[in-house]
Structures are given as C-alpha cells and as structure tokens.
Amino acid sequence: MADVLKKVPVREQAPKVRAANFEEVCLGYNKEEAMEEAARCINCKNAKCVGGCPVSINIPAFIHEVKEGNIEEAYKIISESSALPAICGRVCPQESQCEGKCIRGIKGEPVSIGKLERFVADWARENGIKPPAPAAANGRKVAVIGSGPAGLTCAGDLAKLGYDVTIFEALHEPGGVLVYGIPEFRLPKNKVVAAEVENVKSLGVKIETNVIIGKSTTIDELLNDEGFEAVFIGSGAGLPMFMGIPGENANGVFSANEYLTRNNLMKAFLDDYDTPIARGKKVAVVGGGNVAMDAARTALRLGAEVHIVYRRSEAELPARVEEVHHAKEEGVIMDLLTNPVEILVDENDAVKGMKCVRMELGEPDASGRRRPVEIPGSEFEMELDTVIMSLGTSPNPLISSTTIGLDINKRKCIIADEETGKTSKEGVYAGGDAVTGAATVILAMGAGKAAAKGIHEFLSDKK
Ligand SMILES: Cc1cc2nc3c(=O)[nH]c(=O)nc-3n(C[C@H](O)[C@H](O)[C@H](O)COP(=O)(O)OP(=O)(O)OC[C@H]3O[C@@H](n4cnc5c(N)ncnc54)[C@H](O)[C@@H]3O)c2cc1C
Ligand code: SF4
C-alpha cells in the first residue's frame, strides 16, 4: 500500500545518463501513476490550491476526473483556464503556487498538481484532443506583440471571443523564452512547445514571424494605418545585464541569453545545424537564478566542467530548489560566496580565467536577504575558457521609445494596470515580463488573460 502522505514518485533519467544528453530529464506519470496520485486529493470544498494558481484552474475538478480515469474531461476543465498546460505542468514553480497551498502539504507532501496537469496535457496531445472551438468571428482586429506565454495567452483568449488576432514576433519561431531560453531537457521544443503553439493557431490566431515592432513597423502605424483597434504588448524582458568589470568584452564571455539562444533556438548542440557554440572545457556561470542553472546544465551537456559562481550562499540562491538539486546531481560545482572582479584575458583577447573575491554575509539589505560583503585579501584566480553572465535581464526599450504616449517606469518596464493590462495609451495593453521585469511563465499567462478581458471590455464599449 502506497504512503498517502507522499507523492507518487515520478520517473526521471538517471543523473549520469542525462548529463550527457539533451533529452527531457523528467519522464512524467503514466495513467496508473496519475490515477494513484489523483486519489491523494481530498477534493476540498474551499480548495486553497485554486487560489495559488495565477490562472485559477479548477484543480479539484480536474484531479477528480483523473482519479476516475476520465482524462479527456480533465483536459477540458484545464483548457477553460489555461492555454499552455503541458508547458505550465513542466516549468511552473508549483511549490510556491498551487502545491504550496495544498492542504495535503500540512502533514505530508502536497498533491503533485503540476505533474498531474502535465500528464493530462501530454495525454490529450498524444490522443489528438484539441481545445474547444472559438466563437463566431466578429471581424474586429487586435494585434499582439510577442509570442511568449503572455502574447499566446492573450491571443488565444481573444480568438475564443471571436476577434481577428495577429501576433507579430521578432524571431523566426514563436514561443519567446519557451523556445529560446528554457532548455530542451526541461521543455521539449517540437513535442511540447510547437504543439501548444499549434493549439493556439487552431483557434484562428495568425502568427507573423520576423517582424520587429519599433523597426519593421510601429504600434502607432498598426493602430492608425493597419486597421487594428487594440494592441497587446507582450514583448518580454530579453535585454541582458552585464557586470561592468574589466575583460568582460573578451572572446569566450557570453550572456546567458546568447548562450541559451544558440543552443535552444539555433540547435547548436545538434551536428546538422549551422550555428556554432563555444564548447568550453572549463566554464563559469555567474549568477544563481533559474537562468544560471539552465546555462550551467547546458554547458555540462556540451562536455564542460561547470562552476556556478554566486556571491551569496546556497540559502539565498534564487533558482528553484528542484533546479539546484538537478544541477548538483548532474555534477555542476557550486562556488558560493564568490564574486568575480575581473575576467583574465590572453594575448588573443580570449578568456583564460577569472579573478574572484570571497564573500561573507552581512546585515539584511532592502530585499530582506543578507548582504554579501567582500573578505579583504581573499582574492584568487580561477582558470577558465568560457564565462556565462547570468545576472538578470530587463525589457528592451525599442517599443517604448517608438510609441507616442506609452509610459515606462525607471526600470524601463511598461506601466500597465494589473487588473486590465491598460497602459497610458488608449487602446494599448501590456503584460508579462515587459511590465514586471523577468518573472514566470504563469504570471505572464495570467497577465495575458487579464489583458484579453480588458481589451474585450474596451472594444465592447467602443462599438
Ligand atoms: C533561461 C530561462 C529559464 C526560465 N525558466 C523558467 C521556469 O522554469 N519557470 C517559469 O515560470 N519561468 C521561467 N523563466 C521565465 C519565463 O520564461 C518568463 O517569465 C516568461 O517567458 C515571460 O513571458 P512573456 O510572454 O512576457 O515574454 P517572453 O517569453 O520573453 O516573450 C516575448 C516575445 O516577444 C518578442 N519580442 C520582443 N520584442 C519584440 C518586438 N519589438 N517586436 C516583436 N516581437 C518582440 C520576443 O522575441 C519574444 O518571443 C525562465 C526564463 C529564462 C530566460
Ligand atoms: S488543496 Fe490539495 S487536496 Fe485540496 S483540492 Fe487542492 S489539490 Fe486536492
């Protein structure tokens, strides 16, 4: 008899095996495992888990259907609230959302809501189940900028209401961070992301790739000349930050964005693709977030010895606990309480190492985390051939600087109302990382959903 206080374990590739391939680490539940895990849910009347989900999926209802073996019914319930369940089931930080609120978590482990969602979405895809058909077309045009989770969700919701929606995407493939950032071994691109994008297209959404708003055309042109009655901006926060230390322009220093884009979007890890990538032997990734873990685990799979260099201690690492655990299991070395002060460069202007200082934790700073303080005289050098900077990103100012009357804050984020997505410019809505700065997939989806509602109300009043 299984222990009801514990989650049904999920099958994973063994650490040694997966450290040498780009296949998905987590293999997911099969139907028997999913039904067994679903039976742990006590179908709470006032289900706290729903309040923890930014798009309010009816979690007890879908889990009940899984328990009964009615997976198609479960998929319909999830589809009412979420356009990208196979993605969210894989990458959402459930521990701080739905599962963090689950009543089962008080005495034992919470119900494995994310893995159940993933199972249902994968099952639906494998069995050719599509989301429900949209409403009759109303002929009114809305433009969406960016095809990340915010844009896809907003577009999908508007299409369901009958709007004629076109997404404009700067890159050659839709998906935003889902295709260029999050690696294949956490989120398979063809199997999962492309299939969910197809589901959004099946609602009638058109996607025009290779269109950079702010260069190819502008928001004002879309509104004034192209017949769009409203615009949603979901352009993300893709501009990387650097440290500003000596040697940072040397060959062999990458932003995590560039490194991951080469590998994920341009498939540099596959021999039959043209884009090259530096297959370093000894790589340091500077930073401690999810992006740093992704870059480190990617470099490891390309054959390198990889160090995470982070100025605080393990307790302050901003990455998800599961990601840190996976990275360590695979052999990523953690150099904590360590801060780079200079990139060391050889006569060919290539990286040969990094000078660092040891840190200790002082008093808490404004963020509530203990502030790292340099230990005097603790400088040392690491020998390296590649450095990947993963210090965070901010929104690209291209759109805000080319749109008349669109207000931004001092972090270059677009100012938008949380409930409706409304910006300072009439008819223009925004959401996701472009508004919040780098955040999560599900928050971007929640913002896309709120803005679709905001746009619908605006256009219904305008009639
Ligand atoms: C490496 C990495 C790992 C992550 N891991 C996780 C995770 O595990 N879980 C999680 O919840 N979140 C994770 N995140 C964060 C999450 O991916 C983002 O919060 C989310 O993708 C934001 O969605 P978005 O739609 O706002 O923007 P994005 O996904 O950034 O999409 C914006 C899109 O707009 C396009 N665009 C930008 N400017 C223009 C323009 N001028 N014209 C036309 N198109 C434009 C971009 O090309 C892009 O496709 C991760 C992020 C990264 C970088
Ligand atoms: S809180 Fe947990 S046990 Fe209760 S309905 Fe939600 S998933 Fe089930």
Image (tube, grey):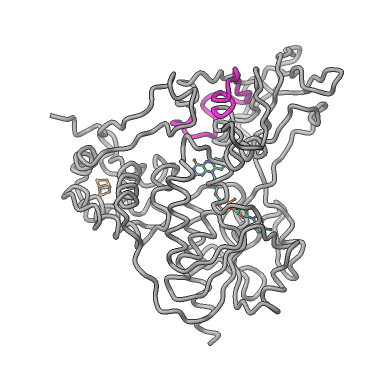
Question: Any magenta on residue 268?
Answer: no
Q: Quadrant of the N terminus?
A: top left
Q: Residue 291: image x %, image y %?
A: 58, 36
Q: Residue at x 84, y 23 (%)?
A: 349
Q: Residue at x 50, y 64 (%)?
A: 154
Question: Which span of residues is magenta-colored?
Answer: 297-323
User: Quarter of the image holding residue 400?
Assistant: bottom right
Q: Residue furthest bottom?
A: 463
- Left or right of 194 in this view: 360: right
User: Quarter of the image holding residue 234?
Assistant: bottom right
Which of 91/202 is in front? 202
- Left or right of 38 in this view: 384: right
Q: Residue at x 55, y 30 (%)?
A: 293
User: Quarter of the image holding residue 78?
Assistant: bottom left
Q: Residue furthest front?
A: 272
Q: Residue 65: image x %, image y %?
A: 21, 53
The relative height of residue 459 versus residue 123 in the rendered view (above or below) is below
Which of 96/354 is in front? 354
- Left or right of 232 in this view: 384: right
Q: Residue at x 34, y 51 (%)?
A: 125
